[in-house]
């Protein structure tokens, strides 16, 4: 089973504290599935903006098709966030529950995506920082790449069909949708 998330696997703002529970929950589910001989739950966080997205599109022509890269903190600090002071812990320590990957599909499309960390927690930050960037710890990373390739779409850059359909059928059109929202707001204010 796979879920596509429109954006990174992170929780920002006041609710960021919950990311540790989400990470542990995904880990526990996958551990249980493994004991039963079942494939792991897959969650793909697809990013369509940001510094990594800009970076992969800048260097895209020099990347060989059918390539995947696990983004290390050292790589991010040297080539992507080079003008920013590196974190004292690890990138996204307070918000992320998934690792960043760069993918160029067989067809040449470029994607930045997250896969859940295969660890229950980040308690030993030095070990976690090293192990999160070891692609061998993501035993089903090939399945992630295959799913993205199978569902890639030409609707817009870095599009996959599940997210494109979700956006199409959940979007509120400006004209009638705006009027409905105005009516709801007016009703709420009057109460």
Image (cartoon, rainbow, N blue to C red):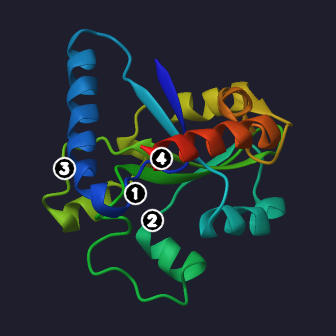
Q: How many marks?
A: 4
Q: Quadrant of residue 161?
A: top right
Task: State the CA–CA distance, disc 1 to disc 2.
Answer: 5 Å
User: Residue 190, labelled with which disc?
Assistant: 4
Q: Disc 1 vs disc 3: which is toward the camera?
A: 3
Horizontal and vertical percent for residue 155? 85, 37
Q: Residues within 10 Å of mark 2 (few under 14, many from 20)?
A: many
Element on which disc 2 rests: loop
Residue 44 or 104: which is nearer the viewer? Answer: 44
Element on which disc 3 rests: loop
Q: Can you name the residue that lies furthest to the front here?
A: 190
Label located before the other in sequence (1 or 2): 2
Q: Disc 3 vs disc 4: Cβ atoms closer than 8 Å? A: no
Q: Disc 4 vs disc 1: Cβ atoms closer than 8 Å? A: no
Q: Quadrant of residue 107?
A: top right
Element on which disc 1 rests: loop
Q: Disc 1 vs disc 2: Cβ atoms closer than 8 Å? A: yes
Q: Disc 4 vs disc 1: which is toward the camera?
A: 4
Would you name the residue on which mark 1 appears?
133
User: Residue 121, labelled with which disc?
Assistant: 3
Q: Disc 3 vs disc 4: which is toward the camera?
A: 4
Label located before the other in sequence (4 or 1): 1
Horizontal and vertical percent for residue 43? 45, 33
């Amino acid at each position: 089973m796979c879920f596509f998330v429109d954006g990174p696997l992170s929780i920002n703002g006041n609710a960021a504290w919950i990311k540790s529970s989400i990470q542990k929950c995904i880990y526990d589910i996958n551990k249980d599935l493994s004991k039963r001989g079942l494939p792991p739950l897959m969650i793909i966080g697809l990013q369509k903006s940001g510094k990594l997205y800009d970076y992969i599109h800048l260097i895209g022509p020099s990347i060989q098709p059918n390539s995947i890269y696990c983004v290390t903190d050292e790589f991010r600090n040297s080539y992507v966030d080079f003008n920013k002071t590196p974190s004292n812990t690890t990138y996204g320590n307070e918000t992320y529950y998934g690792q960043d990957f760069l993918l160029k599909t067989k067809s040449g499309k470029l994607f930045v995506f997250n896969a859940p960390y295969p660890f229950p927690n980040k308690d030993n930050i030095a070990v976690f920082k090293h192990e999160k960037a070891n692609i061998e710890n993501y035993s089903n990373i090939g399945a992630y790449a295959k799913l993205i390739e199978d569902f890639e779409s030409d609707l817009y850059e870095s599009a996959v069909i599940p997210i494109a359909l979700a956006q199409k059928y959940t979007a509120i059109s400006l004209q009638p949708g705006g009027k409905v929202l105005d009516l709801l707001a007016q009703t709420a204010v009057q109460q």
